[in-house]
Amino acid sequence: MFSRRGVFSKVIAGAVFAAAMGSVLPASAADTIKIGEINSYTRLPAFTEPYKKGWELAVEQINKKGGVLGKKLEIISRDDAGKPGNAVKIAEELVSKEKVSLLAGTFFSHIGLAVTDFAKQRKVLFIASEPLSDAIVWSKGNDYTFRLRPSTYMQSAMLAKEAAKLPAKRWATVAPNYAYGKDAVKAFKSVLKELKPDVEFVEEQWPALFKIDAGATVRALEAAKPDGIFNVTFGGDLAKLVREGSIRGLFEGREVASLLTGEPEYLDPLKAEAPEGWIVTGYPRDFIEDQGHKDYVAAYQAKFGELPKTGSLVGYNTILTIAAAIEKAGSTDRDKMLAAMKGLSFDSPSGNVTYRPVDHQSTMGAWVGRTAVKDGKGIMVDWFYADGNDYLPSPEKTKALRAK
Amino acid sequence: MGFYLAQFLTGLASASSLFLVASGLSIIFGVTRIVNFAHGSFFMLGAYLAYTFVELMPHGILGFWGSVIAASLAVGLIGVLLEITLFRRIYKAPELFQLVATFGVVLVIQDLALWIWGAEDLFGPRAPGLEGAVRILGEPIPQYDLALIVLGPAVLLGVWLLFNKTRWGTLVRAATQDREMVSALGVNQSRLFTSVFFVGSTLAGLGGAVQLPREAASLLMDLNVIGEAFVVVVIGGMGSVPGAFLASVLIGELNAFGILVFPEITLVLAFLVMAVVLIVRPWGLLGRPDAVLRGASGPPEEPLRLFTPLSRNLILGLVGLLIVAPFIADEFTVVLLTDILIFTLFAVSLHFIMGPGGLVSFGHAAYFGLGAYGAALMVKYLGIGMISGLVVAPVVAGIGALIFGWFCVRLSGVYLAMLTLAAAQITWSIAFQWQDVTGGDDGILGIWPAEWASDKMTYYYLTLLLVFGGIYFIRRVVYAPFGFALRAGRDSALRVEAIGINLKTQQWMAFVLAGVFAGIAGGLYVYSKGSIFPDELAISRSVDGLVMVLLGGIQSLLGPIIGALSFTLLEDLVTRLDYWRIIFGGVILFIVVIAPEGLAGFARKLLPDRLTGKTEEEARS
Amino acid sequence: MSLLAVHTLSKSFGGVQAVKDVSFELAAGEMLALIGPNGAGKTTCFNMLNGQLKADTGTVLFDGKELIGLNPRTIWRLGIGRTFQITATFASMTVRENVQMALLSHHRKVFSLWPRAADSFKEEADGLLDQVGMLHQADRACGILAYGDLKRLELSIALAHGPKLLLMDEPTAGMAPQERITLMELVSSIVKNTDISVLFTEHDMDVVFAHSDRLMVLNRGEIIAAGTADEIRNNDLVKEVYLGGGSTFDAGEKGAVHA
């Protein structure tokens, strides 16, 4: 009788603890630099897969050349399943158990913000690679967080500057109903108004993210008879909007400025039905003649058998950022890395990238051009590289935006 | 005039799409009483398969519509396969348990689709012959919209004929009203169920396939459509196909005209309509009373028993282990245990109304989120301390439950469940939309514990104290007259009213109590994560809770604890792997098949009497 | 004064007159049977008496207090117990707990959150179970009881708050003949010992004639006869309703004219 009780308590206690500590992984060799990476791999694979390939390529290249400070980079990459709570838990594990030197990643703005706040609380360096929210470096910015990708504000400003050159005066906007859409519309409006005070905004549509009722939305836009349309929808919403809009002639004789639509992630799936003549931000990866970029594309194609996408470049530059920062700091000491990150400058396939000391935003830019269809697929034409630095508020203005 | 007519036709086209998905869901629920979360996955498969077939077949009108039909039938067969291999094994399980299986199927199909079709959205061709638009009163109307406007009523007619003019249809209608009767009449029930699954899944596949000319096949289609499909089914009345049609038209048109006036409304419109309809007509537009949420007549629940001395000692031992855990485990394990404890309290509070209360809630996340937001907003605007925050959390959640509960307890079964979901979605949309106050989906940041509790170990002990206090309190309540009256009302509403108990009030108070404890869990959660986002109020959080409760075993008080523990641990373990959803889903399906009474019930069968205190009758059976 | 006075009670469902101008009185300690063929309106009548259905017209005075418009739980508190045609008990509780539940409600303890319900009013519950011969099964799960035992359990639940009147809808339905006799003898003895009144409906004529002080015959919603067992046995109209083939048809036509 006694023995049975003993067996049972042991079995159950053992099961609980084996499960609780099942996450124990073998401690890895001390000659690597561990980097914790978190992203929404299962929630949005269309965008995070290319990103992952991008950083994998960079890690491979750097490690082949002997790593950083003589140590190889080791990425511990985890899926947050699209849940901010999970991301914070994983961040905790990466920091406290894996003892990573810094954190990187995230795609969704709210998850980026959750980890931003975690970084501040746990005093750990965080490179927010993909999230676009302005809050990450401005209203919710902190000493520990740096952001790589050109923000919502920057990309909207790029389009607003181009839109200001057009004769169009009556504008309508269509954006997914969440923070990114709201921020983009706000930024576009304010920059365009500033550059061209006589513009009017005659209609706003706010379809729920990934649930656009495209027919009805298109008709509502059409009813306002705008000269120009600013579009922020993307992914599946964009595809529906394009198809319903073109059948109903919404885009005929109208200018369209469309955020991110030139990115291969969004343009490629549209194939021959990609819109023509839209002003977009994006990434004309097959036409960039710069040698550094050509080498990067070649290496990427060799490794994965496909062209890189925007996410690939962001993933690649994330690792370049980390390598450059550790190199500059001369160690993985947190304070030294933080100091190194301020004003960090390095060359990437997309040109020079500098992290502004004032708000920790990188100057990585985007390509602005018009869309066209060639050989049954959407491409960008008449594009130019918009350096992020030209679209950011001045350091003085930024100080007012940034949290203390 | 032309403009409004065109907007009306646009609404009708959307309504047709919606109806195709919803009709299949309604038919399956009507007969099998399975709340099929995987219906959205069938819809998604329909779109992907249609894409593949369109690519394979010769282009042209025949090739296109041939692909649509082939894809629908293929999805129908997948439905049949699932019914035969999976659902058939668990019809006898306690109410709603099949829902867990459908949850597992959703996960598995998500990863399979990613594996087969890749991550990129697949944009199919337009329908041959219907590429353009025709002008009606000067307004361009896509030809394909017109085709859909015809297809919706045509399918409705087809289903009506099938139901009213065939022997099969007569049986299905009879089974919708009284399953026991049909089996008593000697009808081969399993063949009937299989055929119902085939029809329902085929309709879902058709719904997905005909979407191809309108939207790209993507991995988000399943979850995007399922919520709205349920709403349509419920507004129409569960099991009523004409009702589903009516509801689709209602939602489609309200959407089409709503966005002209208030574009942001699309976020929550369907759920608002559902809430209003359910308050006015508790069984939907064309539904019948008593769509009771019981998956077959499961065995009656056992009377409550106290722990045997042995099991009490064991549990005390486990508590002791949790108390010393921070000294023997690493820091992250402590964080993970904190998470587990919080979700355990959440699951126990949900189980309290679902198990003893018999009120199924699909929207319990509302109270978790209200607790978290209550605390976070007070911190943000009033700068209150952590202790005050943890006091505010249950109060706010309790007030929310007091308001929503009053409406919800007036309904029953699946309608009640859907009203709780509507309440949660409305709460979610407020948190999401009211950017100036709640920060919208950027959430509220910087809600960290007070200095003295900022250490992970201290916070763990605080959580342990509150969670154990909460669970112990709920357990006492279940054993107290209040809990007895609640269970009595679940067993026989007729009898409790006939012995002087106001069941609605009893249930309402139980709702509030469950809300209060979910609120405590939410408060603990926000301080452990430092931030709060609308996600914590969303459907997925509610579904996680449901799966924990059902997986653990709804008929056992230990069920939600076991369920929360295994769900959270399993999720933490598998998300480290690639294609983890297929593994997670697979494990859940495995558990569902081997332990249809839930993990707690399964363990009870295996464990010795000294531990479980089985009665002699039970031991004999 | 009579305990229960029913006056011109009527109820129709969508044009069908289910109960029509039913009036009767019941004295304290009396056992009154309400009989009639299927669909005669017996259960509708019952449901109006205990508040489950709202009467169209009529009054029901219990101890001089109007019952129409009150809900079942209020009527129960006034001292009326009820058993159902198909037993309504709590399957997930033990036999004793079923009775304790009624006692807890009677003592207004259902919002009590802390003490154990299973420890409350235990002696009282056991006493009630003993009265119906169910004490030896007090700890068994209600869900596994034989049907006859369930009926007896339901009786003890209905008696838990010491009612002055017991409404029993087909108390012996679904039971074996021997069980019926036992149950009705049990009810009779309780009536004798406690001075409680019982109004019951019944199909089994042996039961009715053996155990009622008085009978009423309901047909097509109307009381067609009332009296002692012998009076009813010899009533021609009753014979017609129960034995005659075409008589129900005639009654139907008569009802149609009135409607």
Image (cartoon, coloured by chain):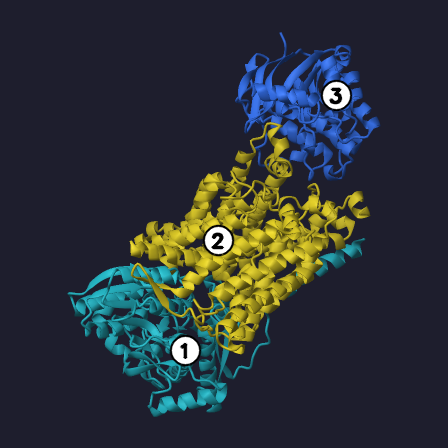
Chain colours: A cyan, B yellow, C blue
State which mark lies toward you, 2 or 1: 1
Judged left or right of residue C103, residue A250 is left
Judged left or right of residue C233, residue B150 is left
Marks 2 and 1 close (CB-CB < 8 Å): no
Residue under mark 1: which chain is it in?
A: A
Residues under labels 3 and 1: Cα distance? 82 Å
Per the rendering, the mark at residue C184 is none
Residue type highlighted by circle 2: Leu
Out of C241 and A334, give the one closest to the viewer.
C241
Which residue in the protein does label 3 denote? C242
Which residue in the protein does label 1 denote? A271
Q: Are marks 2 and 1 on the same chain?
A: no
Q: Is residue B204 above or below residue C206?
A: below
Residues under labels 2 and 3: Cα distance? 71 Å
Residue type highlighted by circle 1: Lys
State the SS at label 2: helix
State which mark lies toward you, 2 or 3: 3
